[in-house]
Amino acid sequence: MADYWGIVGYPVSHSLTPRLFAAVGEYLKMNSAQQVFLEANGIAEFESRVAVLEGDLWLSCTAPLKHSPQDRLGVSGPDGVNAVNQLKRVGGEWSGTSTDGVGFVAACRHIGIEPDGSILRMRGGGSAARAIAAAWAAEGGRIIPEEGRRPLISGPWDSAIIDGGEATIGIDLDAAPAGGDSETLDADMQVSISYGDGASTDEFAVIMVAAQHLEAWKSIFAPERAA
């Protein structure tokens, strides 16, 4: 059981994650942890902030901290993703994983889109893009990459990459955090995973953050309580 749980990264003041921790914890009768919002622009600031928190710590990790924990904390994400968005410290030992991809797939299914046989048009090549590409390809989906700030590199999703087609869903992963605007993509439906203050529960970004949070409980925080 965690002594603290919450969010780390920058910005985080808008984050729903601490409230999601509280909601799931209450449901599972594991609600004695203290909520934390830890603002950190880099791994050194992250380490200084968590050093003063004694005990076990469960954190969702957002930009710009999805890459650096791997080297400094000795944790690793899924194959090809090379980033984490969930961190757990128990007895001073760190573990971590990425739930961005599986959360995206779960959110798509929630709105009626099945990845198998569907085409995803995706702009961006960062950690969230790689996680989503890996999960989408693993579920039988196809991907049309659109170059943004960086290209989507080679990875386990290579066989799912296609040059063109009618995209079922599009997403601009280069949209700024906290509700930043997206570039318009050619797809039947476009979604965003960036949300800000006042976001509603029917927004895709909110559905996804809830989905990836539930996946984190199942895979790393409390797998023994998974249904």
Image (cartoon, rainbow, N blue to C red):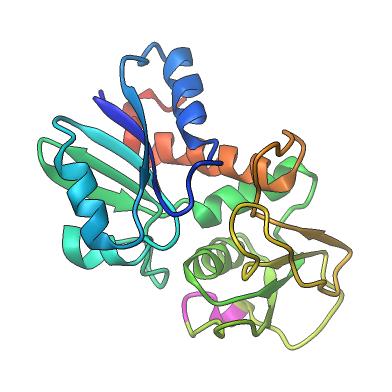
Looking at the rendering, which quadrant does residue 74 occupy? bottom left
Q: Nearer the viewer, residue 200 or 79?
A: 200
The residue shown at (62%, 64%) is 176
Q: Quadrant of residue 81?
A: bottom left
Check the image and report above or below for 141 versus 178: below
Q: Position of residue 91 (x, y in %)?
A: 10, 35
- Residue drawn at x 65%, y 85% is 147
x, y percent for residue 24? 48, 22
Q: Is residue 40 left or right of residue 81?
A: left
Q: Residue at x 45, y 60 (%)?
A: 63
In the image, is residue 157 part of the stretch drawn in magenta? Answer: yes
Q: Magenta residues? A: 155-159
The image shows residue 199, relative to residue 113, as above or below, that is above
Q: Percent from the top left, x then y, of residue 36?
A: 36, 33
Residue 75 appears in the picture as rendered? no
What is the magenta segment's predominant secondary structure?
loop
| Side of 184 relative to 176 (left or right) | right
Whether residue 96 sits left or right of residue 208 in the image: it is left
Q: Magenta includes 169?
A: no
Residue 1 visible? The answer is yes
Q: Quarter of the image holding residue 69? A: bottom left
In the depicted view, which residue is nearer to us: 13 or 132? 13
- Please indicate whether residue 99 sits to the left or right of residue 152 in the image: left
Q: Residue furthest top?
A: 29
User: In the figure, 74 relative to 2: above or below?
Assistant: below
Residue lying farthest to the bottom in this orientation: 163
Image quadrant containing the N terminus: top left
Residue drawn at 72 percent across, 46 percent down = 204
In the foreground, 224 or 53:
53
Q: How many marks?
A: 0
> Could you say where residue 170 lies in the image, as x and y percent from the top left?
76, 66
